[in-house]
Image (cartoon, rainbow, N blue to C red):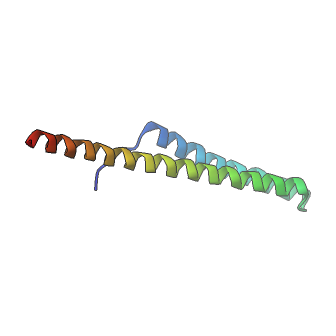
Amino acid sequence: MAKTRISTFEIVLLIVGIGVAVLGFNLINQVYSAEAKISWLMIIAIFNWLMLMVLFVSLSLAVDISKKHLIETEKMVELLEQKKGKK
């Protein structure tokens, strides 16, 4: 398996994702504690927060898949160059 380095983008994505998760949960929890009931605005806020979390996970997966695709493409180019050199 190829070794890949963690990029700056992935580190920033991880930090922002954890920050959004913690901050969003705390804010929703504070509003629920203050109101002590679930309103439509609370449901919308929870839904939007969960959608944001899904987007962060999707972005992370897309970056990982594109890195793997790049590594495989580089391997294919290397193999084709080796094959071309033998002829």
Which residue sits furthest top? 8
Question: How many numbered tags mark residues here?
Answer: 0
**Residue 14 screen position, x and y as percent:** 53, 46
Residue at the location (90% across, 62% down)? 37
**Residue 68 screen position, x and y as percent:** 38, 50
**Residue 4 screen position, x and y as percent:** 33, 47
Which residue sits furthest front? 87
Residue at the location (38% across, 48% down)? 69
Q: Nearer the viewer, residue 18 or 40?
A: 40
Residue at the location (88% across, 52% down)? 41
Q: Is residue 38 left or right of residue 70?
A: right
**Residue 65 screen position, x and y as percent:** 44, 51
User: Which image quadrant: the C terminus?
Assistant: top left
Which residue sits furthest left? 86
Q: Nearer the viewer, residue 78 or 50?
A: 78
Q: Nearer the viewer, residue 3 or 31?
A: 3
User: Which image quadrant: the N terminus?
Assistant: bottom left
Residue at the location (59% across, 43% down)? 16
Q: Is residue 50 left or right of residue 1?
A: right
Q: Is residue 5 left or right of residue 83?
A: right
